[in-house]
Image: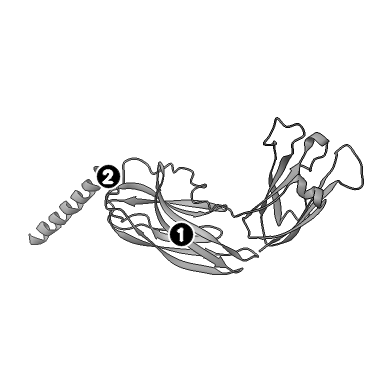
Amino acid sequence: MKKVIVLTCTLLIIACSLLACDTGNNILTAPLPFTVSGGHFELRGNSTGYTPGGTYDFKLSIRNNTDEDWKGNCYVFLIDKNGPLMDISNVEFDLYTGGQEDTVIQMTLPVDIEPGAYGLTLLFPDKGSTVQTIYVGKNLPDEPAGPWPDISSYKQSPATIIREELTVDDFVKQPHYSWVATADVGDNIIVTLGSNLTTGFKWPDTAQIYNQDILTQIDYKFVEPEQTEVVGASGKEVWTFKAMKKGTTTISMEYRRPWENAEKAEWAFVATITIQ
């Protein structure tokens, strides 16, 4: 008789548990682990088991699978459906070819964070990002997670700008000018050269770059003279270049009348750029 009572009680407990799971939100009794992998990273942690005010760890591995040294920053932050919500970590790395860096990312949730679904985001500026859904609170929310907003522009590191500017007067004094500069991968290089279109002379819209794998032109514009009421006032032509990879290359431009086939240009500009 005792065995029957015990068995009956056990069945009742199981039945109540099943009923509890079938009504209302799904109750999360244990963390659900996840592993997110990409070409250069692996992020491991749990999708569930988070409570407001708690502190939790994620394991991050960054690998250099390229044939060059790779350095930069990796940002980890939390988002909701409206966008970035909380910065978690900024990981700086400097890896040789085949190298790997392992680190632990620690997240402390605000005590007033609302239960629900959030996106744990990993961002490599200019390279890509990934979002892993995690749940705060004991219950799964009724509404689906996401959709997560585009966060590719968040935490973009502003590029260092390296400038060289020469006026018309500079070229009158020195018609052929050479410039030597050093930049890092990702830097922007801006060259501004004086120009007077009323004479028929101009610089080319597209500069000649010896190796465009190392340096590429991303913009060109003509800037009108500041004193537009002055006849024959000089303006500026501006080129923007992006440092793409390590190496040395040259930029060359000639100032001439496009319709003339003169062998010798009026002015010339040559730059030797080393990307390190």
Where residue 15 sits: x, y (%)? 19, 50
Q: In the image, which is nearer the foreground, mark 1 or mark 2?
A: 1
Q: Nearer the viewer, residue 148 or 207?
A: 207
| Residue 207 appearing in the image | no
What's under tag 1, amino acid-wise?
Asn
Label at residue 57: none
Instruction: State the residue in front, 257 or 147.
Output: 257
Q: How is the image coloured?
A: one colour
What is the quadrant of the C terminus in the image? bottom right
The vertical placement of 136 against 200, above or below, is: below
State the residue at coordinates (53%, 53%): 157
Position in image of residue 34 (x %, y %): 41, 58
Tag 1–tag 2 contact (CB < 8 Å): no
Q: Which residue is mark 2?
A: 25
Q: Position of residue 145 (x, y in %)?
A: 38, 44
Report the amino acid beneath label 2. Asn
Q: Residues within 10 Å of mark 2 (few under 14, many from 20)?
A: few
Mark 2, secondary structure of its residue: loop
In the rendered image, the quadrant that contains the N terminus is bottom left
In the foreground, 267 or 51: 267
Residue ID at (44%, 43%): 148
Residue 207 rendering spot, x and y as whole percentages: 76, 47
Q: Is residue 144 visible?
A: yes
Q: Which residue is mark 1?
A: 90
* Horizontal arrangement in the rendering, residue 265 relative to residue 164 (left or right): right
Residue at horizontal 21 percent and vertical 46 percent from the top:
19
Disc 1 is placed on an element classified as strand
What residue sits 55% from the left and 52% below the top? 158
The image quadrant of residue 44 is bottom left
